[in-house]
Image (cartoon, rainbow, N blue to C red):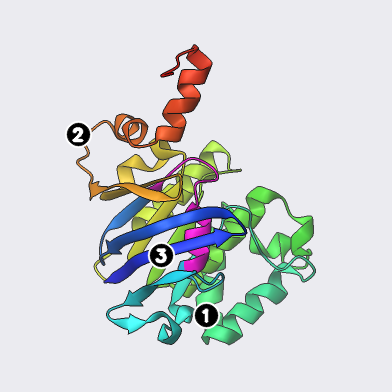
Amino acid sequence: MIKINKINKKFGEKTVLKNITFNLEKGKCYGIFGNNGVGKTTLTKIVFNEIIADSGEITLDEVNQKEIDYLKWYFFVENNELPADISVISYIKIIMNTHNIKNSDLNYNIETFKSFLDINLIKNTLIKKISAGQKKLLSLFIMVLLKPKVIFFDEPTANLDIANKDLLLKVIQQTIGPETYVIIITHLIEEVKDLIDHIIIIDDGEVTYDKKYDKQENITKIFRENTKNLNKDIEKIMGVSNA
């Protein structure tokens, strides 16, 4: 079990995360939902030890965060934070060397992915020269190659056309298994609702909802009822005031 316990974070005078606490279990797909700017990505970077929390702790099966083997984790990011000035194949080779991946595994995945992203056509291209959609598919390709045990998807469906969006959702579905943790962080809740087993909503830096998701429930209604900032914006648009 991954335990997120009482995480707090400020940037200057701005409080971004307030006492964030929840647990993640193997074999389930979690949706961490919230509007842009509510602290979802900051929390994920804290989980991956890229940002240090002001207080709180994170453990995996009672192992402290400092001792977690992050080579078995994967952060599928929205804005494709890939190295810009190296070629696609150079980046893949670095990943392979770091994780002891065989050439046979690489060749198998290249062939499997060919109809969606032909690695051979872009392998000598600098990563900064490929499109946003290709970067996302490259990140997906790397994820499949690595077979990680813990996967965080940050806004996975952004910048993808319908066909590649469907591909990505199918791949996410295939990653869900008894030994994996799968977490989807997004504000595009309708696009991922069929994958979700459990919903966690973050609003204004706080957890406002943390429950198992019944597929018969209206996920949009759940989201609206637990995002006060969204409700305030709607009131402004409609000319409603509580004053």
> Badge 2 is on which residue?
216
Q: Is label 2 in a helix, a strand or a loop?
A: loop
Q: Position of residue 154 (x, y in %)?
A: 50, 54
Mark 3 residue type: Ile
Which of the two discs, 2 and 3, labels the residue nearer the N terminus?
Answer: 3
Label 1, residues with CA under 10 Å away: few <14, some 14-19, many ≥20: few
Mark pair 1, 2: CA separation: 43 Å
Residue 111 appears in the picture as rendered: no
Residue 226 vs 97, above or below: the answer is: above
> Badge 3 is on which residue?
7
Range covered by the magenta-colored residues: 32-46
Mark pair 1, 3: CA separation: 42 Å
Which of the two discs, 1 and 2, labels the residue nearer the N terminus?
Answer: 1
Q: Is label 1 in a helix, a strand or a loop?
A: helix
- Residue farthest to the top, as pictured: 239
> Badge 1 is on which residue?
104
Q: Quadrant of the N terminus?
A: bottom left
Choose mark 1 or mark 3, whichever is in front.
3
Q: Is residue 115 left or right of residue 207?
A: right
Tell whether label 3 touches label 2 (CB within 8 Å). Answer: no
Q: Quadrant of residue 8?
A: bottom left
Asked if the magenta segment contains residue 37, the reply would be yes
Residue 215: image tag: none
Label 2, residues with CA under 10 Å away: few <14, some 14-19, many ≥20: few
Q: Position of residue 20 (x, y in %)?
A: 37, 59
* 96 and 221: which is toward the camera: 221
